[in-house]
Image: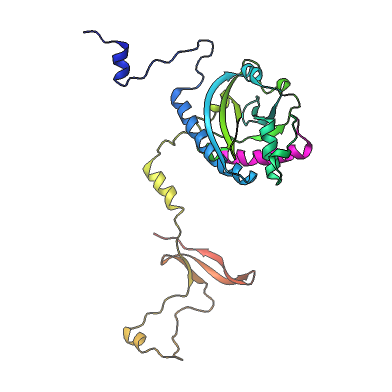
Amino acid sequence: MTVSVVDIEDAGTPAPEPYDFRRPAAIPRDRMRRLEQAFDVFAHRWEANLGHRVHAETAVDLASLAIVDYREIVERLSDEDTLVLCTVPGVDARGLFRMPAPALLVWLARMLGGQPSAVPERATLTAIEQSLVRRLLEGAFDDLRYAFAGFLPVDLSVLSFPPSPRLASAARPDDAMLVATFAVDVEGIRSSFTLALPAVAATAGAEEHAAPVPGDPAELLRAQLTTVPVDLALRLRPAPVSPATVLGLAVGDVLPLPHPQHRPLDLAVEGQVVARAAIGTQSGNLACVVVDLEESE
């Protein structure tokens, strides 16, 4: 019996994927899927954030996620691109945001209440526009930290705005970069922006953010019990009385208490005396000063 390739594909087995030996896989496949999920979360959060800032209906979707050399990123840049270099914690290479200048200027115009039709055609940003882009990216970085919380320590910050994108030195030409490309639609105007991070940053912290190994049950229980809230009370020594005395209480009755005036009050936790304290004040409120600790069996 022979089985053809068509039969295998019809059975639901995925087709083989070509392997590029010039670019070995730097990130395991399961980790790449986890990265895609995190970038999807970022895209949905950034969609709402960007729409609020530009006062327009906005859609953001993850278009692709790949590992490429930094040389290839530079080769794909155009003169209309605006590049923003970002610091990446734990690595020497820089991250970068690439955005087409025409679309970016439309966003900035909407942020200031202007009309897209009046946007000038240029690739460089003024100092005021750079400040607005910085604020725009700060919101994106917050969404990125949220999307990668518990997975990767992605904590980016704006470093500089290179005047010439092709001459920007974010990494060495042969450094592997994790490139996430997003499709953006603002009021029907479609564009894209790219976030590139050093590939080594996508694997850093994997052990630190892995699920914790369970410890000794007794130690875990003891550590948990130390955080449980309890009631702390400052009280006089109790006076034993009969039920008849309690039922016969009336306004003005005086009950003698077996607590000498010179004796500190009892400090009790859930009815168990743990210390003795004297009455005092602090910042206009009643307080107590611990004067003696009582050992409990």
Q: In which quarter of the view is residue 240 placed?
A: bottom left
Image quarter (top left, top right, bottom left or bottom right) of the C terminus: bottom left
Image quarter (top left, top right, bottom left or bottom right) of the N terminus: top left
Q: Which residues are magenta?
A: 124-143
Q: Decide whether the magenta segment is chiefly helix, strand or loop.
A: helix
Q: Position of residue 17 (x, y in %)?
A: 43, 15
* Viewer-side residue, 168 vs 60: 60
Residue 137 is one of the magenta-drawn residues: yes
Left or right of 296, for residue 82: right
* Viewer-side residue, 140 vs 189: 189
Residue 268 is one of the magenta-drawn residues: no
Q: Is residue 195 visible?
A: yes
Q: Position of residue 257 (x, y in %)?
A: 45, 81
Q: Residue at x 53, y 68 (%)?
A: 277
Q: Is residue 203 visible?
A: no
Above or below residue 153? Residue 217 is below
Q: Residue furthest top?
A: 2
Q: Residue furthest right?
A: 127
Q: Position of residue 47 (x, y in %)?
A: 56, 40
Q: Residue furthest front?
A: 117
Q: Residue at x 60, y 28 (%)?
A: 194
Q: Residue at x 31, y 21 (%)?
A: 12
Left or right of 141, for residue 227: left
Q: Residue at x 42, y 76 (%)?
A: 238
